[in-house]
Image (spheres, coloured by chain):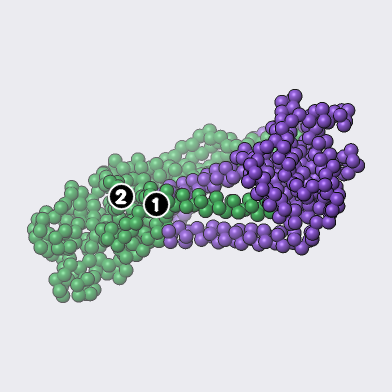
Chain colours: A green, B purple
């Protein structure tokens, strides 16, 4: 499926800044109409073959540059319940990336160059959002120790307490990425996404971006969501227990009851950069603008900086020494 | 290069300030030294020589360079600056003059006699001045001794730690060559006399090379290794209303116990540093000084 402009026939895309469908050819706003494609492997605009992987749900035609949504992969059981439309435009994502990395030492000259940044793409990454009602029951023994001196004698008083807590925690939409192409640790780091900005799924939001459907199942990913809920529950429990010198748990039971789960597409800008045969990946949260990624290191630059810095520091120390000697 | 200059702008500014400050200090020293000290008053000194290289460790050229340097530093400090090198046992010399003398004091007796005998002193005979005696000979105890004899205002200025610093510095440089060692003695004396004596630092150049290298490695390391990102969620991020509902909370006192123990007190000893030693030579002249052995 492709969204075409009713006025000029160009490819209408979702514009994050305008928060509307936009035709970059005639500047038309909300002038889109759906045009179904006959085959999933063919561009609905020019008919060129599309490079579609097993889990692609939206892509760009390499031939004419039009953005396609693969209907079959966003319908029926594969239809997402929710989508968080991109709120950060490509221009803003590039700016954020530059802000984050331009002051890093030793990055190669071509890093963040206009040519390489051109390849940055917005991707809707599949996530499952889990709701849990957690009940945490805790009982433990805490001690409070105080000491004082009288004469040359030190007294230590230890008091023992029975500590009991029962907490009820309502977890709302804990996200777990359902893409085998995305590194779990990076997707976790990219959080949080604003849950209030989630909307009911509409295919038009995908026009102008790449997209993936889930490649891992809801049940398979649930342990990751449960682990996040368990970790947060224990942290919240710790916050309620204070003032003790030591605390020892006698009983701790967490009961997690899943309320609902939703399939959602969340926005991520991805930038790839290759250096000396290694591929580096950078992510920008398409809603919050949070930036992630490790910068490549140019060894030549690093040694030049290190050598220069060494000489500079040595000169400073030498003059410092000479001044102290004169004084 | 531009990036480097921009990134370490503060370091370059600091370096510039240090260079300017050092130049001002050196200039100020030279000026105040010349104004303060005037011309040499002592006319009774038996010699115009300042470099007595009896151990013959210096070349003629090096001796000449030292003489020139000493002449300049004498005007700047208002002190006679004498250098004596020996390579002979001073045991008999010392025992002839004093019955009970420790090995490290042989050099002191010789240095005092040498200074007094030649009537050194910038302002008067046996007046302001300093003499470094470097004896290369190893006495029976296996050590070679050197001595710094200070007189007049040099005696007043020099503390024990300043003497240690000067001798240590001279000894360190003499490992490169004796000439460098004696040059360091003359220059350090000049700095000590004209400075405020606030610092008596003892940091070697190789140590500075090492420190600057390690600092550079640490800075490069910190800036080279970058984390992919930081976690920006917390325990409340996915909790409705941001807090847990507390159904039950109880902190019930069970029991208490008190223990006691005696506090042991220690009366410890301490260490004591030495100051500059002052004594009166056989000629009745007050000298300060300190020694070094290696």
- The answer to which of B65 and A272 lies nearer the viewer is B65
* Neighbours of disc 1 within 10 Å: few (<14), some (14-19), many (20+): some
Q: Quadrant of the N terminus of chain A?
A: bottom left
Residue B293: mark: none
Q: Quadrant of the C terminus of chain A?
A: bottom right
Closest to the camera, between mark 2 and mark 1, is 1
Give the CA distance from mark 2 to mark 1.
14 Å
The vertical placement of A158 against A135, above or below, is above
Q: Which residue is mark 2?
A: A275
Q: Which residue sits at x=40%, y=59%?
A: A102
Q: Do tags 2 and 1 sit on the same chain? A: yes
The vertical placement of A115 against A149, above or below, is below
Q: Which residue sits at x=91%, y=42%?
A: B284
Q: Is residue A57 visible?
A: yes
Under circle 2, the secondary element is strand
Horizontal side of A300 relative to B32 (left or right) equals left
Residue found at the very far right of the displayed protein: B284
The quarter holding residue A230 reads: top left
| Location of residue B228 in the rendering, given as x and y in whole percent from the top left corner | 39, 49
The vertical placement of A80 against B256, above or below, is below
For mark 1, name the chain.
Answer: A
| Location of residue B51 in the rendering, given as x and y in whole percent from the top left corner | 72, 44
Horizontal side of A141 relative to B270 (left or right) equals left
For mark 2, name the chain.
Answer: A
Under circle 1, the secondary element is helix
- The answer to which of A53 and B161 lies nearer the viewer is B161
Q: Is residue B275 visible?
A: no
Q: Which residue is mark 1?
A: A301
């Amino acid at each position: 499926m492709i969204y075409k402009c009713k006025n000029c026939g160009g490819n209408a895309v979702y514009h994050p800044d305008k928060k509307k469908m936009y035709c970059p050819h005639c500047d038309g706003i909300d002038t889109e109409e759906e045009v179904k494609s006959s085959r999933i492997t063919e561009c609905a605009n020019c008919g060129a073959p599309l490079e579609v992987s097993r889990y692609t749900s939206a892509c760009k035609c390499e031939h004419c540059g039009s953005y396609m949504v693969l209907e079959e992969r966003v319908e029926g059981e594969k239809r997402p319940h929710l989508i968080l439309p991109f709120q950060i435009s490509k221009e803003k994502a590039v700016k954020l990336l530059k802000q984050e990395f331009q002051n890093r030492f030793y990055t190669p000259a071509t890093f963040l160059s206009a040519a390489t940044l051109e390849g940055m793409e917005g991707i809707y990454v599949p996530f499952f959002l889990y709701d849990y009602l957690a009940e945490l029951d805790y009982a433990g023994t805490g001690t409070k120790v105080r000491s004082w001196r009288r004469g040359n004698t030190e007294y230590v008083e230890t008091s023992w307490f029975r500590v009991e807590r029962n907490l009820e925690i309502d977890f709302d939409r804990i996200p777990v990425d359902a893409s085998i192409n995305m590194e779990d640790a990076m997707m976790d780091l990219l959080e949080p996404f604003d849950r209030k900005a989630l909307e009911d799924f509409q295919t038009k939001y995908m026009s102008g971006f790449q997209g993936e459907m889930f490649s891992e199942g809801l049940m398979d990913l649930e342990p990751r969501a449960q682990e996040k809920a368990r970790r947060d529950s224990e942290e919240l429990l710790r916050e309620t227990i204070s003032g003790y010198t030591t605390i020892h748990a006698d009983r701790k039971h967490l009961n997690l009851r899943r309320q609902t789960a939703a399939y959602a597409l969340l926005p991520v800008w991805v930038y790839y950069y290759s250096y000396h045969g290694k591929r580096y990946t950078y992510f920008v949260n398409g809603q919050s603008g949070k930036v992630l990624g490790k910068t490549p290191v140019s060894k030549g630059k690093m040694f030049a900086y290190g050598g220069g810095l060494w000489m500079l520091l040595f000169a400073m120390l030498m003059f410092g020494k000479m001044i102290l000697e004169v004084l | 290069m531009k990036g480097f200059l921009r990134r370490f702008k503060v370091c370059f500014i600091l370096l510039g300030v240090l260079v300017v400050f050092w130049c001002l200090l050196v200039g100020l020293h030279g000026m105040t030294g010349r104004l303060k000290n005037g011309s040499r008053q002592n006319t009774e000194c038996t010699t115009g020589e300042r470099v007595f290289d009896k151990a013959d460790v210096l070349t003629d050229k090096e001796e000449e360079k030292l003489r020139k340097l000493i002449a300049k530093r004498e005007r700047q400090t208002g002190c006679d600056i004498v250098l004596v090198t020996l390579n002979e046992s001073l045991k008999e010399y010392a025992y002839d003059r004093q019955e009970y003398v420790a090995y490290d004091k042989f050099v002191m007796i010789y240095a005092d006699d040498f200074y007094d005998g030649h009537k050194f002193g910038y302002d008067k005979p046996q007046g302001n001045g300093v003499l470094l005696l470097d004896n290369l000979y190893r006495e029976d105890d296996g050590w070679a001794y050197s001595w710094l004899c200070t007189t007049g205002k040099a005696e007043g200025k020099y503390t024990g730690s300043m003497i240690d610093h000067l001798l240590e510095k001279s000894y360190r440089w003499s490992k490169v060559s004796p000439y460098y060692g004696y040059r360091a003695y003359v220059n350090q004396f000049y700095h000590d006399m004209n400075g405020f004596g606030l610092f008596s630092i003892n940091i070697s150049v190789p140590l500075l090379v090492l420190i600057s290298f390690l600092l550079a490695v640490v800075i490069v390391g910190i800036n080279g290794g970058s984390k992919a990102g930081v976690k920006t969620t917390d325990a409340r991020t996915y909790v409705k209303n941001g807090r847990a509902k507390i159904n039950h909370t109880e902190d019930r006192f069970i029991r208490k116990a008190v223990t006691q123990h005696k506090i042991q007190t220690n009366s410890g000893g301490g260490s004591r540093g030495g100051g500059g030693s002052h004594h009166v030579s056989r000629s009745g002249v007050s000298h300060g000084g300190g020694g070094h052995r290696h």
